[in-house]
Amino acid sequence: MIKVGLTGGIGTGKSTAVTIFKALDIPVFDSDSEAKKFLLDSEVKKNLMAYFGEEIFFNGEVNRKALAAIVFTNNSALSFLNSLIHPLVRQAIELWFDRHQSHPYAVLEAAVLFEYGFYKQVDKIITVRAPFEERIKRVMIRDGITKEEVVHRMNNQLKDNEVVVRSDFVLHNAEHDLLLPQILQIHQELSSI
């Protein structure tokens, strides 16, 4: 089985690509969703309470919006959060890949594939790209946040050109690009290896 990483900056269209891979019966590990599950872990919550205090909790659970408001504007807080969550995610990725050995390939979707070393867990890398202004519009609509907030989040990720040179495949997701034919071509290549 080939372990494939799927990445791209915020608003590039990774979720659309994931939907297509799933429709092709390819298993996909959504690292963001898995990371959020670890916020329910009692040990993680205890550490978050000690670091951030009660302001990020609501009814005993982590208020992800309050947490995001802090970590996306404070690099040391983001580093602390990542130091708690990423080792757990790495372990979950390995176990997940082991369970999907019967497939020709499986996809690990991670916006921060390079930033946090998840690229070391895959054999091939696919990057989704989209024009800067389209990305901003998509995220503003999707998340209901300002342009400034989107740009700040984008600045916490690697630039497109840094990611592309480290990728085996690049999906172009501009307004008039069709993802399906691009993904079908990659699917055919990965399935035949």
Image: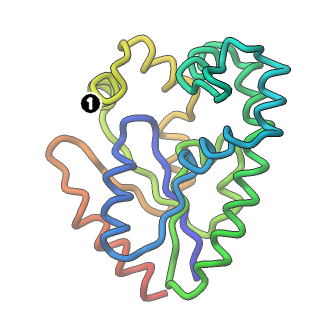
| Residue 26 location (% of width, % of height) | 42, 74
| Residue 108 location (% of width, % of height) | 55, 61
Point 52% across, 54% down: residue: 30
Point 31% across, 64% down: residue: 20
Is 20 in front, or is 183? 20
Point 58% across, 22% down: residue: 68
Amino acid type at circle 1 is: Glu
Residue 12's place in the image compared with 88, above or below, is: above
Q: Residues within 10 Å of mark 1 (few under 14, many from 20)?
A: some
Q: How many marks?
A: 1
* Residue position for label 1: 134
Is 43 in front, or is 178? 43
- Quarter of the picture holding the N terminus: bottom right
Image position of 8 (left or right of 99)? left
Indicate the colouring scheme. rainbow
Is 69 in front, or is 12? 69
Instruction: Give the quadrant of residue 130.
Output: top left
Instruction: Give the quadrant of residue 77.
Output: top right
| Residue 118 location (% of width, % of height) | 67, 53
- Residue furthest to the left: 176
| Residue 132 location (% of width, % of height) | 34, 28
Instruction: Give the quadrant of residue 141.
Output: top left
Residue 185's place in the image compared with 42, above or below, is: below
Residue 133's place in the image compared with 94, above or below, is: above
* Helix, strand or loop status at disc 1: helix
Point 37% across, 71% down: residue: 186
Is 120 in front, or is 19? 19
